Image (tube, rainbow, N blue to C red):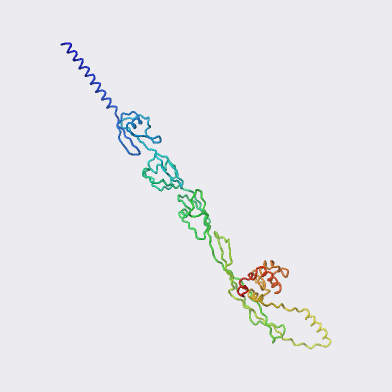
């Protein structure tokens, strides 16, 4: 009986020890569990684990991580209950910077994170909003960086930083217009580059009018009623006027080109008409002893008198148009004589063998020199008058 009771107590004691061990183990198991928070690209979840490190906890929760993912705290960090683990996934983002495409590796969440990673200027222009999440991107991030541009125009140089793409856009940004005749050293469609220099040359075309005097000529008529040598002005001569119109081109206010657009006689010269008497003078009665001497003087005079050159035909008509028929005119406008030679034309045609300047030569010498000119260039040396007279 005593042995049976003793055996019973031994059995009860063993059962109690086992129960105690089970209770202690359960308490220790419950005490070792942890609840942690895991955020993956901003998406939070709660994870229960008995893992000791971050890596073990993520493995228990079946959350994979890549080599380029950013995990905070580090994978080998010991964790405690209530620990927060942040995971930012590695992403490949297509970016276009000033038209050049590239791929950016990032663990950022938004466009702004990529810009910060690229360390771009605050003045950079982004097609997409900085707050846009990378997950929502459907096109590459389009970025225009600021560029230094100098514009030389109107006597000064303007400098600006711009993020626009083309020359036309930067001129619009600078509020500058290019006229239809102005010159720009680039096309409006050309791309903007850093340290670009643009030059605008203002081109202006205007007309200028110049007037020149056309000297009148003198026409001599014979008057048989007046004595030889007596002259009388029948019609008073009046100078005419020639109008020359030039087309003048200015570049940045400076004349660079001048062309004769029109050369017309706007006021015709009025020929002076002078009558010269042809009536013979009465011969004085001379003493007999002086008759021989008078005859000698008369013979001497007849020998020294020159007959005036008779100018007629096309050259006479041309001289009348050009100078009013005045073969000795020098009006001070750079043209001389009846056919209005310039000094250079006179020299080129060999006229200096007659006289230094045309108006100092006889009409015949002037015509001979003009024939040399006409042989080389035709009647075109006298464009307006030759056309008017139908010579060409």
Q: Position of residue 180 (x, y in %)?
A: 50, 60
Q: Position of residue 330 (x, y in %)?
A: 66, 72
| Outermost residue to the right | 289
Q: Position of residue 361 (x, y in %)?
A: 71, 72
**In the picture provided, is 283 more to the left or to the right than 234?**
right
Side of 299 where 322 appears, left or right: left
Compared with 228, 381 (above or below) is above
The residue that appears at 36% across and 43% down in the rendered structure is 135
Quarter the N terminus occupies: top left
Residue 279, above or below 67: below
Q: Is residue 156 visible?
A: no
- For residue 228, which quarter of the picture? bottom right
Q: Using the rendered view, name the quadrant where residue 56 is placed.
A: top left
Q: Quadrant of the C terminus?
A: bottom right
- Please, which residue is most extreme toward the left here? 1
Where is residue 316 drawn, in percent x and y? Answer: 66, 76
- In the image, 288 versus 303, the foreground residue is 303
Classify residue 57 as left or right of residue 316. Answer: left
- Is residue 19 or residue 154 the one in the foreground? 19
């Amino acid at each position: 009986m005593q042995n049976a009771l003793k055996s019973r107590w031994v059995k009860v004691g063993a059962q109690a020890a086992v129960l105690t061990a089970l209770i202690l183990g359960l308490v220790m198991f419950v005490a070792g569990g942890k609840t942690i928070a895991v955020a993956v690209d901003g998406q939070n979840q709660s994870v229960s684990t008995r893992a000791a490190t971050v890596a073990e906890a993520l493995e228990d929760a079946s959350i994979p991580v890549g080599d380029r993912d950013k995990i905070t705290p580090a994978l080998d960090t010991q964790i405690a209950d209530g620990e927060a683990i942040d995971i930012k996934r590695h992403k490949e983002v297509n970016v276009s910077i000033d038209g050049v495409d590239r791929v950016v590796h990032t663990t950022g969440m938004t466009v702004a994170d990529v810009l910060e990673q690229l360390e771009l200027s605050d003045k950079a222009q982004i097609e997409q909003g900085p707050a846009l999440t990378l997950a929502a991107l459907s096109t590459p991030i389009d970025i225009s960086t600021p560029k230094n541009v100098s514009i030389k125009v109107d006597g000064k140089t303007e400098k600006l930083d711009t993020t626009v793409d083309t020359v036309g856009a930067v001129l619009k940004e600078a509020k500058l217009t290019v006229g239809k005749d102005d010159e720009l050293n680039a096309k409006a469609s050309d791309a903007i580059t850093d340290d670009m220099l643009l030059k605008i040359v203002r081109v202006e075309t205007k007309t200028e009018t110049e007037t020149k005097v056309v000297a009148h000529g003198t026409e001599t008529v014979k008057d048989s009623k007046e004595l030889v040598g007596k002259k009388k002005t029948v019609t008073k001569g009046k100078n005419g006027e020639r109008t020359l119109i030039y087309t003048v081109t200015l570049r940045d206010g400076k004349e660079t080109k001048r062309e004769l657009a029109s050369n017309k006689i706007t006021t015709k010269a009025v020929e002076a008409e002078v009558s010269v008497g042809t009536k013979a003078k009465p011969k004085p009665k001379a003493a007999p002893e002086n008759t021989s001497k008078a005859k000698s003087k008369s013979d001497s005079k007849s020998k020294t008198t020159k007959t005036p050159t008779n100018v007629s035909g096309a050259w006479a008509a041309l001289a009348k148009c050009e100078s009013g028929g005045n073969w000795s005119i020098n009006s001070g406008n750079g043209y001389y004589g009846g056919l209005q030679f310039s000094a250079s034309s006179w020299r080129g045609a060999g006229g200096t063998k007659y006289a230094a300047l045309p108006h100092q030569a006889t009409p015949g010498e002037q015509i001979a020199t003009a024939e040399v000119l006409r042989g080389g260039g035709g009647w075109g040396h006298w464009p307006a008058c030759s056309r008017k007279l139908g010579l060409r």
